[in-house]
Amino acid sequence: MKYPFKTLFTTLNKVIDSLLVFGLLLFNTFFCCCFVFSLPQYTVWNFLPKNLFEQFRRIANFYFLIIFLVQVIVDTPTSPVTSGLPLFFVITVTAIKQGYEDWLRHKADNEVNKYPVTVLEDGRSVKKESEKIKVGDVVEVVEDETFPCDLILLQSSREDGTCFVTTASLDGESNHKVSLYTEKDLQALPATIECEQPQPDLYKSLGPENLLLKGATLKNTKKIYGVAVYTGMETKMALNYQGKSQKRSAVEKSINAFLLVYLCILISKAVVCTTLKYVWQSKEGQDEPWYNQKTQKEKDTNMVSNFLSFMVLFNFIIPVSMYVTVEMQKFLGSFFITWDKDFFDPEIQEGALVNTSDLNEELGQVEYVFTDKTGTLTQNNMEFIECCIDGFQYKHRDTRSELDGFTVTDGPVNKLQQKAGQVSYTHSETPRTSDGIDFTFTDCEKEELFLRALCLCHTVQVKEAGSEVLADQVDGIDGLLLPQPEEERGFIASSPDEIALVRGAMEYKLLHVLNFDPVRRRMSVIVQTKSGETLLFCKGADSSIFPRVRPEEVDRIRMHVERNATEGYRTLCVAYKQLSAEEYAVADTGLREARLALQDREQKLMAMYNQVETGMSLIGATAVEDRLQEEAAETMEALQGAGMKVWVLTGDKMETAKSTCYACRLFQRGTELLELTVRTLEDGRLKREEKLLELLRDYHRRAVQDAPPVKAGVTSQYRSLFLQICQNCTAVLCCRMAPLQKAQVTPMVKNSKGSPITLSIGDGANDVSMILEAHVGIGIKGKEGRQAVRNSDYAIPKLKHLKKLLLAHGHLYYVRIAHLVQYFFYKNLCFILPQFLYQFFCGYSQQPLYDAAYLTMYNICFTSMPILAYSLLEQHISMEILLDNAALYREIANNAMLRWRPFLYWTVLGIFQGLLFFFGVRFLFSNPALQDNGQVFGNWSYGTIVFTVLVFTVTLKLALDTRHWTWINHFVIWGSLAFYVFFSFFWGGIIWPFLKQQRLYFVFANMLSSVSAWLVIIILILLSLLPEILLVVLRKPRGPHSRQVYLFLPFPF
């Protein structure tokens, strides 16, 4: 055989190629069917191991797991059940909560994955679930339906073969984007689609003109057919999903700090007892008296095992059940926000939404509020106010007149009459020449040109109600729109101000649309008249239009634009340009090539836009009003009264935003404004950097009233000065900000000295980064999609609801959970201190003071429900008072109830009561005969009396702290005490066969048969609660609102 190895390798290559092809076919036929959209954290198979791993990453859970293992391995004084059962309870409840929340995510996914769609198979329409769509399937989508996957458009019901989609759910843009068709005859379409690997960029790869993205909605098109190219988790929507980073509240940080303190106390107790035990045993006759010989197991123990035994004996000072109680309090407490009827908005028929229950208490600690302007402070509902044409001002009037609602307010009288006639002329039937409409700057007045520009330069689509309407509905004005009754006609636009400006259209052919974007801040259209003239109309922000028009035309318009901005109106400049045949040919070729470019498409389009939009003529400007949100001024005033500093971050120009701040009462007329703009930096003597540094130092002296610090780095010095100035101002306004800049300002304040709690609120996709960066993110269910709502921690319908969310709900949530945390540490210190003191009287023998049942049930049953009810229902101050007195919010600012001073107070109170419990009962036992029959109480009776006083005292302490009583509070407080008594009788009244030792058999009943025991229990409870009563009675209130505040603050700050 010739070349045997070469033949062998050739055969192997063919076999490998065949296997690869078979593998690819298998992948496409099996795995592509299973490409479902899935965001949950768990599945049925990995829930148990993954959830346990997540839970034992928490220090307290891991600590109790180690204690449980020590009890199992080492001979300890308490049963492993005493640690194992509470730990099991905590792990189980937390797993149920997390499993429920993940089930809700699965349920939401199933609504998407099980959504019925229509797929073409063998020329027939077949209904399928969306999760069964395979790559290559041809999918049918009807109007107002959401695309189930990423599709390439094949066929459209529109005559021009295009379709319109809105991507508000993806990028917040509500304008209708045009997608291009590929083929009309699907039955005879043999095609192969080659596309790149899935990537998250919404506008790269195939581009928005070719790709219909999952999550977008079909609009103004009855039906389309498209081929699936990306499905499931490979769609751009899934790849753009950004899981929210884990936000930790200040309460969690305080809990961890307190845990370290109590862990040090625990270790100190174990070390003291271990040391004293060996000191005790070193004395002659104490180690092994004749009546208590050691067993071999006891002789084999060493110092380490003794230390571990004491750690186990005192481990209940660490409240493991506090974590599950905090989790339940946050989870159940979040429903009160959802159920609040004051948050319900009848306009959208929705209320508040809680996406993250872990941050409820942070709502009561906010120091800085970062807010968007448009759609947040304002309604994002534009109303046309006036316009300026060629330097003449035209105001809109409410009543119609001979000027059709417009009035000229300046200019010469003879010119006014001429203009008035022409304005009226343009609003009536416009005459046309035989060769079509032909207007130029010299042939027609600018008024007519201005109105035509407004009618043409937009992305408004006229949506016809009837099916008989034959007029085209395209982006821009293409074809004559047939007259229709007003009630059957609607407008679909990219922004509300376009609807306010556009009421009609003329006969023009739309050639190109140069879309608006936040960087260019303008948009243009290229249209052709019937006479064949090509015109470019452009509108945009003054900062974007003025540099592109003739300088001599700017002065006539600038004054009106600045005045309108000062009055709070949104301004828009309008310009035009007549293109010659050669200029249009170059522009047309360049725009088409740029749109088809596979690489650097955005840069090439931007270059062509800049090339076309030069040398224009300025026609005029418009002013539209964006009204304030309902109760926006009252809300901002309340937030400032609560001690919060409000920063407005907006992309609008300074004059407009400044006027809005005055209207919202963020700025007062007597307030000194420190402006830092390009104009304030203009100085011929100094460079801009030097002038900036000089200005910052001057503002620093005025705002901070101190000499500015000197730092080595120039950039860091700018940053430090700017931050210090802003933090000492009552309000800050940042204008002309891009979304990325908003996201950079938020962490600059968040990571500053003191780590202040920040809150960001917005309604659009451009606010998402700012919302995610802040400690607490609030989304408003506005008119710019739901991207902000989905990425927020909380969502509210209107800005006015922020006042109650922070001043009432946030205040109460913080007070409740702060009291819960302090109370848990306090009651566990009361619980374990008598156990520690008991060791001094039992030879450090590790003898437990309480029965194992009491050790197990104390945190689970006897004392858990009252504090949970308190943390859910307590209202130390009514919501009406909290809303009326915003200054009450300041009383709990800066984590006031979880500082070290209140913590020390609760700790001292726990030590005092623990000492009183132990030595009070010991004083009772100084009388040897406590029963009528002359019998004496044993050590288990001693522990039971201490435990009884303990349970009643800590429960009644909570009852004294309760200010808002409901039937639930009465039920759980008195019910818990009754359950303890019932359980003690039941547990000690029956001989349990599974117990080796019946320690409490009839102990509780015998204890209550002694009058002395009753008397001591009552006296000790009263003495324990006496300091609390005296503190409330004798403490003098300070400040106007301290009467209400002192009702719940445990220690004067």
Image (spheres, grey):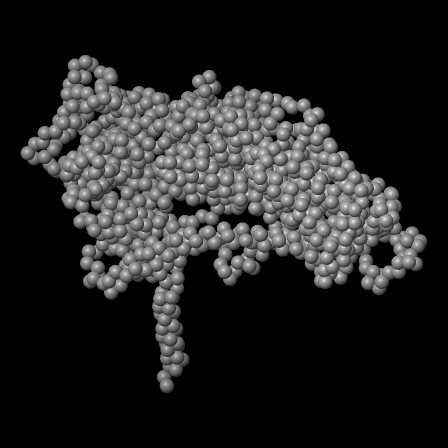
Q: Is residue 368 above or below residue 145?
A: above
Pick whichever, 730 or 550, lies toward us. 730
Residue at image position (77%, 46%) is 1008
Residue at image position (70%, 57%) is 80
Residue 1, x across and y down, in percent: 37, 86
Q: Is residue 85 above or below residue 789?
A: below
Residue at image position (82%, 63%) is 297
Residue 368, x across and y down, in percent: 51, 32
Pick whichever, 265 or 240, lies toward us. 265
Residue at image position (68%, 33%) is 901
Residue 546 sits in which quadrant? top left
Quick check: can you spot residue 309? no
Residue 1010, x across and y down, in percent: 80, 45
Pick whichever, 21 or 1044, lies toward us. 1044
Image check: 267 left or right of 715?
Answer: right
In the displayed orientation, state which residue is furthest to the front: 932
Quick check: can you spot residue 104? yes
Residue 375 sits in which quadrant? top left
